[in-house]
Image (cartoon, rainbow, N blue to C red):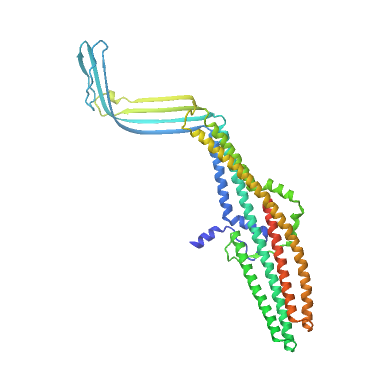
Amino acid sequence: MGNKLGADAVTELPQAGEVLTLPRLIALAQSNNLTTRIAWQQARAAAAAAGIAAADYYPMLVVLASYGGGYMDFQTSGRDNIGGALASANLVPGAAESLVNQATGTGMVLEAGMGNAYTNLLSGAGLRWLLFDFGGRDHRNRAAVSDQLAANLRFNDAHQKLTFSVTELYFAYQAVLRQQQAAAVSARSAREVLSAAQARYDQGFLTEPELLLAREAAAQAEFGLVTASSSVEIARVDLATVVGLPPGSPLQIAPADFTRLTTNLHKPLDEHIRSALRDRADLLAQVAVVQAAEARLRAARTERLPTLALDAIALYNQFSPGTNNRSAFDQVQQNFQNYGAFLTVQWPVFTGFADQNKVRVAEAATAAAKEEMQLLRERVIADVWKAYVRAKNAVASREAAGALEAASRSAYEASLAGLKRGLVPVQETAAARAALAQAAALVAESDAAIAESLVNLARSSGTL
């Protein structure tokens, strides 16, 4: 069952041997990641809710039908209006019919009783059409439409967040890959130093402690290479997971061009902030939430006002007494039809203060939504500012790291050449090699910092 569930969760897999670029990884993630599917279902639910709110504009038609039966016990009494007192009727329940004449004074009392089984058929239709409610249904419909808009924007925001996650992990993978390459260069240079030291030792020009120092440096470089390789594998698993692929998938990732990352920094900071306030899906969704809350507040205020509706009915009732009695009256079938239309005014004069409390709830929800929007707006501006400053600093650090790497490489090459000729001690060459490895690592870290800060800038400004 686990394999079946795993296969159902992945809807799209890369082709065998396919080199995955960043756009391709994003497309795979949008197809496979469950976050966007959840947001899509929420958007569908909001669209259905908007349809429910729009139903208030249409008449409501109800059709009914019922059939059943029972037992009827009917009694009546009266007098002749000539005079005298009316005597009470004491009829036996269930008797088919009885007439009793009792003379009391100058009047005459008539008493009758009837009991019988019956069947009854009722069918009909009722219609109610709300004609006017002081804009209540309009406000409810606007709230539902705003909720739908907010859900759609959250769906877009889910895609943007997923795109951000894929992009961030893609460049993180590229960064650790570059660190692995730097570690490989460091290990190779350490082996070069060890080879030169071994040659000098074999010739008798180098002491054993100096040779052991070169071997230690080579072992440290190999350890750094193994650690960097492990980081590459972990970064590959993280990237596969966010894309929605099994962790053990053999991914072939296209290399990144870090030289093109600084193009967004040509724009001024104010332009990035304006772009964020204009295009951020989460901020626009919060605006829609505020609009929905305001519409619900207006709708709550109209619930205290009267409404005008058109009511119409069409009923057919067939009453059939049983046919097993002796009386012919019991066998008479009665049919009743009713058709009518009415204008109904309904005004909730007192509802136990429920209407007032509904307005208070709506007012508090509206105020809270506005405060959340202001808080999110300030957070968005702060995110853009921090990402822009970090990107600027990362670019400056990358330039300094590049210069440091070039200088360290020249120093190492000169020191290695001197070691081979016996002019430079092995300690100095090992130190030069360590400085070069550190400079190469700083270059890789600077590239990673640039990528991370620029991806955050694109995300915070709403352009990702």
In front: 73, or 361? 361
Q: Residue furthest bottom?
A: 204
Horizontal side of 362 relative to 325 (left or right) equals right
Residue in view at x 72 percent, y 55 percent: 389
> How far from the left and from the top, in percent, is residue 116?
27, 28
Residue in view at x 44 percent, y 27 percent: 314
Horizontal side of 20 relative to 425 (left or right) equals left
In front: 182, or 260? 182
Q: Is residue 431 above or below residue 98?
A: below
Q: Is residue 165 above or below residue 124?
A: below
> How far from the left and from the top, in percent, is residue 227?
63, 71
Residue 310 appears in the rendering:
yes
Locate residue 185: give its quadrant.
Answer: bottom right
In front: 156, or 303? 303
Horizontal side of 56 relative to 235 (left or right) equals left
Residue 145 appears in the rendering:
no
> How far from the left and from the top, in percent, is residue 193?
73, 80
In front: 407, or 18? 407
Number of marks = 0
> How far from the left and from the top, in percent, is residue 265?
75, 55
Residue in view at x 65 percent, y 46 percent: 377
